[in-house]
Image: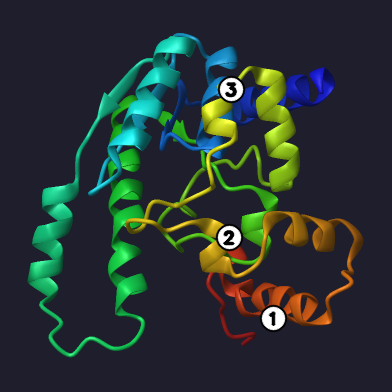
Amino acid sequence: METLVQRLCDWMRDKVTEAKAEGVLFGLSGGLDSAVVAALSVKIFPQNTLAIIIPCHSLEVDINDALDFINKFNIPYKIIDVSKIYDSFIRLLNDKEKENNFKLADANIKPRLRMTTLYYFANKLNYLVVGTGNKSEIMIGYFTKYGDGGADILPLGNLLKSQVRELAEYLGIPKKIINKPPSAGLWEGQTDEEEIGISYDQLDNYLRTGKLNNKIIEKKIQDKITQSMHKRTTPAKPPF
């Protein structure tokens, strides 16, 4: 695990140097992935790391967990509450004929507002935006395109969720964050596994081995990988 941390830190440092940037910033949610990104970032750039907490009708417990983490690791931070902007935007859209997927369409505005906030400060400070996505989520497209999927580097992008959890243990991430049910915080009571319809253990096992004992779950994962291909590539162009 020590070797992995060193390689990740070296890689992140190299990417910042290549971009002639002066540091890194990221959104801190109070969850596992962003905490690991934060712990790595502050190891590399103790004076040039910025955590941004961006509540949008967020749970108080998540904000408090993020603040407790910041205090433990002594990370510079800002809090930018975009709840009122979100509410204003929803009123502006005023979609009276909402269809079945309106809940997700509304919810996806939140990570896109957060992305805009992160890039404002990244431009201002000449920092790179560090994304918090892991391989498990990226492979099935469990992220918002041009939202939390919008980042300059993804240090956890080749690590399964189970590997991120092991890394968190090594880095000394608080147990209450490690053991918290993963959630994107898109709406009250939302959890990743319930929304995906697959447990992270099942997903990681499939991505690791290419098979599961449950053919229905296998097909579900395969379908998600295929359907989300557009989220992992640059916009398609015609071949002529």
Question: Mark 3 and mark 1: span between their CA atoms?
Answer: 34 Å
Q: Is residue 83 left or right of residue 204?
A: left
Q: Quadrant of the C terminus?
A: bottom right
Residue 200 lies, with reference to residue 95, above or below; the image says above
Asked whether 163 or 37 is in front, the reply is: 163
Question: Mark 2 and mark 1: span between their CA atoms?
Answer: 16 Å
Do the residues under discs 3 and 2 have CB atoms within 8 angstroms? Answer: no
Q: Pointer 2: residues within 10 angstroms few (<14), some, or many (20+)?
A: some
**Total residue callouts:** 3
Q: Given the image, on which type of amino acid does mark 3 rest?
A: Ile
- Name the residue tied to disc 3: 173
Q: Pointer 3: residues within 10 angstroms few (<14), some, or many (20+)?
A: many
- Name the residue tied to disc 1: 223
Residue placed at 48% from the left, 56% from the top? Answer: 191
Disc 3 secondary structure class: loop
Residue placed at 81% from the left, 23% from the top? Answer: 1
Please state the horizontal and vertical placement of residue 140, each as a whole percent of the image.
64, 66
Q: Given the image, on which type of amino acid does mark 1 rest?
A: Asp
Asked whether 187 or 92 is in front, the reply is: 187
Residue 30 lies, with reference to residue 92, above or below; the image says above
Please state the horizontal and vertical placement of residue 4, each as a whole percent of the image.
79, 26
